[in-house]
Amino acid sequence: MINRAELGRSTRELLEHLLDLVLPVRCVGCGAPELAWCDRCRVTPRSIAASAVPAVRAAARYEGSVRAALLAYKERGRRVLASPLGGYLAWAVADLERSAGLEPRAIVLLPVPSRPGAARARGGDHVLRLARAVAKQRGVPVMDCLRLVGSVQDSAGLSTAERRANLSGRMVALPPPSRGLVAVIVDDIVTTGATVCEAERALRSAGWAVAGAAVVAATPRRTVAPRS
Ligand SMILES: [Zn+2]
């Protein structure tokens, strides 16, 4: 049964995808025509160690054209950006491999799950799609084996402690299909690290060895003022 609100949303999504195809393509950074993200606006990937436990590597800071590209991809359905953003994620995966001394053939990419409602509203799981872009570019396998259980609210605006409480015990993982595989958690953005910490906990309790996480971009740490 599909209700009126869902019908309205899927019609809007369909229109957005059609517009994505027919509207002239403009760069998310400078607005220049023809490319969704022009070479001049792309920043060179660089190693950002966003967290030590678990080890989290990002390829860029969440600012400027990287932020604009992630928002356009995630919130406005610009799927064409999955490939260049996947390039940044692939770079972060390689950086984690180097820093952790991993054997590339042993690793498996495990995307963090989206809330089902968010994935529906966005027309699919955007992190899974990024992981698949990395798989295509680097030949690393992807397993979609992390799930959210119970209710998880949108983490925007929550403090680090609130994010941890919101996610604590809310992920479950399928066990590794064979011995010797090492999990690399992948996500689009790391802010407080609460999501990757919960993913790591769920994977370890399902029997996985976890090397750390690779993400496209890291947000600068903010200090959250205590609530009065
Ligand atoms: Zn540009």
Image (cartoon, rainbow, N blue to C red):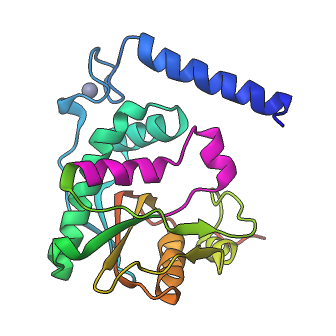
Give the x, y percent position of residue 8.
75, 25
Q: Is residue 219 above or below residue 125?
A: below
Q: Quadrant of residue 131?
A: bottom left
Name the residue: 71% across, 61% down.
153
Give the x, y percent position of residue 86.
30, 48
Q: Is residue 117 magenta?
A: yes
Name the residue: 42% across, 42% down.
70
Give the x, y percent position of residue 97.
19, 73
Q: Quadrant of residue 202?
A: bottom right
Residue farthest to the front? 178
Q: Quadrant of residue 10?
A: top right
Q: Is residue 65 above or below residue 94?
A: above
Name the residue: 54% across, 77% down.
198
Q: Which of these two is toward me, 38 or 222?
A: 38
Name the residue: 27% across, 22% down.
35
Residue interval drawn in magenta: 112-136
101 relative position to 93: left or right: left
Quarter of the image with the N terminus is top right
Q: Which of these two is toward me, 61 or 11?
A: 11
Total numbered circles: 0
Residue 52 seen anywhere in this rendered image of the structure: no
Q: Is residue 202 above or below residue 214?
A: below
Give the x, y percent position of residue 23.
43, 11
2 relative position to 48: left or right: right
- Secondary structure, magenta segment, majority class: helix
Residue 116 seen anywhere in this rendered image of the structure: yes
Q: Which of these two is toward me, 222 or 24?
A: 24
Q: Is residue 159 magenta?
A: no
Ligand 1 found in image quarter:
top left
134 relative position to 138: left or right: right
Quarter of the image with the C terminus is bottom right
